[in-house]
Amino acid sequence: MSTIRLSFADRALSVADHALRALTSTPQGIRPRPVAGRPGAPLDDADRHLAGALMRVNHVGEVCAQALYSAQALATKDPALRRQFERAAGEEADHLAWTAERLAELGARRSLLNPVWYAGAFGIGLLAARAGDARSLGFLIETERQVESHLESHLERLPAGDHESRAIVAQMKEDEAGHAVAAEQAGGTRLPAPLRWAMRAAAKVMTTTAHYV
């Protein structure tokens, strides 16, 4: 069976379509949403507000992940690496669907700045890709490690009775760790410390803003 090779223009159009769907549609996950092992306790208004804010931040992270992986897949010239980015993006699309669904259940809205977050993450992904595949993968590794740490902090901050959100975040954390390992195995190189610090600072601005807006 012959392999269909898409041109750069075709892939760019696909990326644009993907962006529109990520920002404007209700996503559908491929994998079933993680289910809590036991029923959650009813949340009071304060706990529901906190859980909604934290899950909004997590949803923003998944919007950014879609942008990053799309940009890196578009820019790489290595077909195998492109497929790796696309597979990871598929898992991140599950995360996007799960967090969107949980936001609706909590009566919380998505970030009003999602188009801004997407555009910024896409631009960063292109810049990372222009540095070469090894550095692009290194950027992915650092991003996923920071996200994993961020999700761990949310497991500590989510209301104790919110088992539904906790189940989602726990699976997301496991997936992100897997993406980092896969990127290491594919030849990702460690980023310089100043760049890692700058990434943490930018992530802090995004997560703090998305908590409220």
Image (cartoon, rainbow, N blue to C red):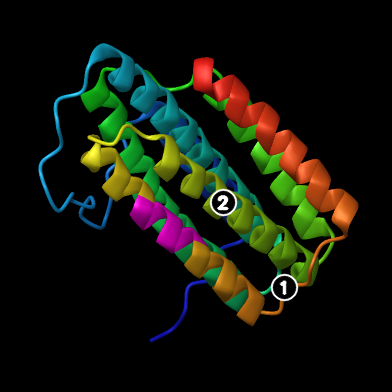
Up/down of 160 relative to 50, above or below: below
At a point 76% along the width and 36% down the height, the residue shown is 201
Residue 20 appears anywhere in the view: no
Question: Which residue was labeled with disc 2?
Answer: 149
Considering the numbered disc 2 on the image, is that residue within a helix, a strand or a loop?
helix
- Is residue 175 within the magenta segment? yes
Considering the numbered disc 1 on the image, is that residue within a helix, a strand or a loop?
loop
At a point 46% along the width and 30% down the height, the residue shown is 23
Considering the whole magenta stretch, tell me its main secondary structure: helix
Could you tell which of marks 2 and 1 lies nearer the N-terminus? 2
Q: Horizontally, is 208 left or right of 125 in the view? A: left
Q: Horizontally, is 98 left or right of 9 in the view? A: left
Up/down of 56 relative to 69, above or below: above
In which quadrant will I find the N terminus? Answer: bottom left
Question: Which residue was labeled with disc 1?
Answer: 188
Choose between 8 and 27: the one closer to the eye. Answer: 27
Up/down of 9 relative to 112, above or below: below
**Residue 86 placement (x, y as % from top left):** 50, 62
In this figure, what is the number of numbered marks? 2
**Occupied quadrant, residue 110:** top left
**Residue 213 placement (x, y as % from top left):** 53, 15
Choose between 35 and 88: the one closer to the eye. Answer: 35
**Occupied quadrant, residue 99:** top left
Q: Residues within 10 Å of mark 2 (few under 14, many from 20)?
A: some
**Residue 147 placement (x, y as % from top left):** 56, 49
Q: Nearer the viewer, mark 2 or mark 1?
A: 2
Q: Horizontally, is 61 left or right of 121 in the view? A: left
At a point 25% along the width and 23% down the height, the residue shown is 106
Up/down of 93 relative to 78, above or below: above
- Is residue 24 within the magenta segment? no
Choose between 98 and 169: the one closer to the eye. Answer: 169
Q: The magenta stretch spans which residues?
A: 170-176
